[in-house]
Amino acid sequence: MAKMFRAFFFKSLFFFWYRFLFRQLKSLIGLRRNILSTQFKYQKFSSLLHQHHRSSELGDHTLVFDVENALLKSSSLFPYFMLVAFEAGGLIRAIVLVLLYPVACAADIIGQELGLKMMVMICFFGIKVDNFRVGRSVLPKFLLEDVGKEMFDVLKRSSGKKVGVTNMPRIMVESFLREYLEIDVVVGRELKVFCGYFVGLMELKKSALHALEQVQEGKGCSDMIGITRFNKVVDHQLFSHCKEVYAVSEAEKRSWQRLSKDKYPKPLIFHDGRLALRPTLFDSIAILMWLPYALILSIIRISLALSLPYNFSTPLLVFTGIHLTTSKIPKMPPNNNNKNTGTGTLYVCNHRTLLDPLYISFTLQRNLIAVTYSLSRMSEILAPIKTVRLTRNRDQDANMMKHLLAQGDLVVCPEGTTCREPYLLRFSPLFSEMCDDIAPVAVNSHVTMFHGTTAGGLKCLDPVFFLMNPSPVYTIDLLQHVQRSQCADVTGTTEKEHRARFKVANHVQSQIGSALGFECTKLTRKDKYLILAGNEGVVMNRECGKS
């Protein structure tokens, strides 16, 4: 009886694995035949790349390209899903993704996109649709930094319609492709939604006919040229309709150069998110391992800044890893007007983080009064220097600043919000009315792991995240003072005074921009928050406000 049962068991096991392997082998043979049936259409990507003198090859043809396997230099999707998990889902979701990623890689071997489906489920399950802004505010920066220059040159040469095909959820890449690379059509996967929340499942792939209808809408030539990888066809039915298909090899992608920032079709001025580095698998593990020590280090640094005078706290903070670079304090010109009016010095700086006034205080080794817009109640209470929140009412803010300036030296950030990239936002001219002598200060900062600013997160955690970096760098450059009366004619009619205010503000902005090598813009705080957070940047009146 035991022998019969053992024979039946092994026989059943044999037939099970035979049928399973046979089906897998059959599907592979079928895929191989499909690929071989269209192999005559495939050409080497290098032949398209070196056809500079034959730009008519592309002409007004519709160009269909594979985002993951042809546009981006790296084929790994983990960093982008890690950004979604960490920025939109939180720390716990990011840890789960890192732990289950090896399982997802193993599932990809079986096929049927199991690994991709696992990552989508981990990252998107339970996320509110209306609150998801990572695809527009966070991912474009990292995707742009991974664009291959060679592929971008091909896209630039094409005058026809450009179609990006991706296996990722469309919501992750659409803003990047449409707004920054000027791609006309994005063919991606849709996410299922229930009661306003993502359920972590993707809709079925669009049929080739549906995709063709979407591609052929509007102007452009109906003939399509495809660019993909030979063994990584995203939508074989769609690429099978192409007149020509160029295949990119992995060796070619490794030799590509990344697209430099000066080549971006649209400059990347605003972006959000806490992570400052590209979260590859090993970098993500390093970040998660560093977090407990980073939190302790941040508490130590905050305690030193709050409890000790500048003479003692500054060297101790440097010992903990903070790098502070300062310029030689320029000789101040005679300030007879300020002396006669009994006011302090007005320091005007660009805005990099909430700690700008504090680092200027460390540089000058004396207490200052800071006024700012983006200020939570907790930050206002814990600040080691006096910090006052502006109301956005021009008359009230002007009276408040004059009152504070009569009490001592004042620091103001006329941009009204932070900017991470080498750009300066428009300076509000309110500070130019305060006094005749203005001290411009050029401020710059550098981080390696976490950004100390946010547009959609908790503002009260900005200093904590900045101080969680292993070696944050701050550069303070004290510039020559500006005399308002020498920049513009501040006497006369109301219209002349109005023009003089803007002239002084623009002069100070250009002086700081020249010192830092930053580009001056006319963008405002409102522009930033409408792009990144979908609001006008109003801080809620709560202990840990959002903006």
Image (cartoon, helix red, strand yellow):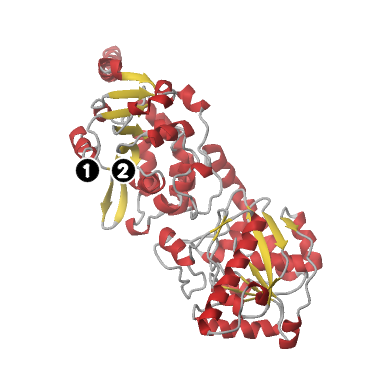
Judging by the rendered image, the residue that carries numbered circle 1 is 218
30, above or below 111, in the image: above
* On-image quarter of the N terminus: top left
Please report the residue visible at 74 percent of the width from the left and 66 percent of the height from the top: 362
Q: Nearer the viewer, residue 282 or 369?
A: 369
100, above or below 351, in the image: above
**Nearest to viewer (mark 1 / mark 2):** 1
Please report the residue visible at 80 percent of the width from the left and 68 percent of the height from the top: 331
Q: Is residue 547 visible?
A: no
Residue 397, percent from left and from top: 55, 81
Residue 464, percent from left and from top: 60, 61
Q: Secondary structure at mark 2?
A: loop
Residue 322, percent from left and from top: 71, 55
Q: Nearer the viewer, residue 92 or 163?
A: 163
Mark 1 vs mark 2: which is more N-terminal?
2
The image quarter containing residue 115 is top left
Q: Is residue 39 visible?
A: yes
Instruction: Say what amino acid the circle numbered 1 marks.
Output: Gly
Please report the residue visible at 25 percent of the width from the left and 16 percent of the height from the top: 37
Q: Secondary structure at mark 1?
A: loop
Q: Which mark is residue 184?
A: 2
Q: Are marks 1 and 2 in contact (CB under 8 Å)?
A: yes
Instruction: Say what amino acid the circle numbered 2 marks.
Output: Asp
Please report the residue visible at 70 percent of the width from the left and 66 percent of the height from the top: 360
346, above or below 52, in the image: below
